[in-house]
Amino acid sequence: MRVQHRHIIYVQGYDPRGLAQYYRMFRTELRKFGRLYQLDATITRPQVAPDGETASWTIETKAGDWQTRTSYDFLRWEDLIQRDLAAPIWHTVFHAMWIYWRLVFGGTLARFWKAHWRFATFISYPHFLLFVEALASLGIAFAFAKGLQALGVPHLYSIAAAAALFVAALGTLLKYTENLTYLLYLLSDTIWTWEFSHRRRPQWDVRIERFAQYLATVARSSDAEEIVVVGHSSGSFLGAEILARALKLDPSLGRHGPRIVLLTIGGNFPIVGFHAVSRDFRDHLRLLAVEPSIDWIDCQSRKDVMNFYPFDPVAGHGIDVGASRRNPTIVAVRFREIIKPEHYNLFRWKFFRVHFQFVMANERPHAYDFFMIVCGPIPLSERMARPEAALAVATGDAAAREWAWKRLEASAASRADAVDLGEMEPSARRRG
């Protein structure tokens, strides 16, 4: 019941900062986690694999009556993402505009809006901002043309000069306001998700296959009690793809070794699954929905405009598997409950900061705690099934912890009986 060794396989989203930035953040947040729960947590330096595609480190966590060792693998995509962001500005702008209007006229954006209007607004934000910056540049160019005409410059020459100024002004605005607006990054993200959905990113598919093989190898060789595949943001559908492909490579993946759990947090499955051509992806969701050897936990937050909330990753794609469905368990996370009010009010409107709270340390003890999921002694499925007991293990006195462990052991026993009987408990929606 008590996890002494856990293996985390972390799948990042579309983030060009990659390993260096993530490791610094992880190390800083781990210290905060230790202070919150008054425990010792130490971390090793990352070791990069020879192919450069994975990096690994180990965390040792010790509390009064438990300790764990966590093997942490970070799957890397930043080389592919940085290549996208190095594309010429005008190529990115025109390509993203073409895709956006295809989403509009093809009805996909309307489906986004119906599923989660906040995400549809967010995906439209860079195009609205692009329109505003284009208007500002047009105003500057218009004033310049009028000034040239007032000086007696022929009309044709003044128009040509104004057009050149418009292009230069808009390009300058896009380039030098990027750190404030993230406009070009978001446009690149739009291009990537559309092309990935349409199977036009073969390098990504090849790497997903390698990561699937890596997961299958880890499952056969690891001595961990559980393996948790964590997918954050776009890593949610990438993690689902990796796990589904690993199951195809080894159909007994979750039966001959550690329990395997897929944890998707801040997910945005529809940006791939809502495209008509994404049949393979929807088939993979169907596979994960009914696979009895895999647990899938999907954590969502209403406050995060970059995930879909509330959204069922299976039924929301029109997938009906009837009574055989057992995944995912959907868990609502309220950031207001895990962050101190004075800090929550400072970043609640900073969308990227809110989005990353899923993988940052809590400021208040809570059943949802990313670092307790990574470093704590309770298996993830039991943590989500008995959140009050999980919290008592972390914060209660000796009597409360004894009660909590009994509750968790009873929960694990009932789940094991359900597996033996082939009567898996149905997907549940927990509201935070």
Image (cartoon, helix red, strand yellow):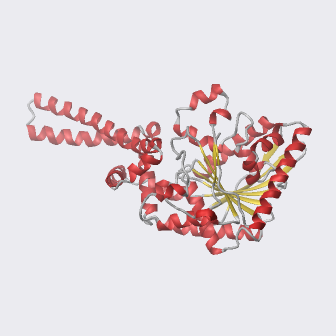
Quarter of the figure with the C terminus: top right
Residue 208: percent from left, percent from top: 57, 66
Q: Is residue 370 left or right of residue 270?
A: right
Residue 404: percent from left, percent from top: 85, 44
Q: Is residue 87 visible?
A: yes
Which residue is at a point 32% across and 36% down the rendered structure image? Answer: 132
Which residue is at a point 63% across and 37% down the rendered structure image? Answer: 334
Depth check, front residue: 160 or 317? 317
Q: Is residue 174 left or right of residue 339?
A: left
Whether 402 is drawn above or below 70: the answer is above
Residue 261: percent from left, percent from top: 69, 59
Q: Residue furthest top?
A: 342
Depth check, front residue: 251 or 312? 312
Residue 216: percent from left, percent from top: 68, 70
Q: Is residue 224 visible?
A: no
Whether 322 is drawn above or below 310: the answer is below
Whether 241 is drawn above or below 365: the answer is below
The image quadrant that residue 143 belongs to is top left
Depth check, front residue: 17 or 29? 29
Q: Is residue 270 left or right of residue 246?
A: left
Which residue is at a point 58% across and 63% down the rendered structure image? Answer: 322
The image quadrant that residue 1 belongs to is bottom right
Q: How many marks?
A: 0
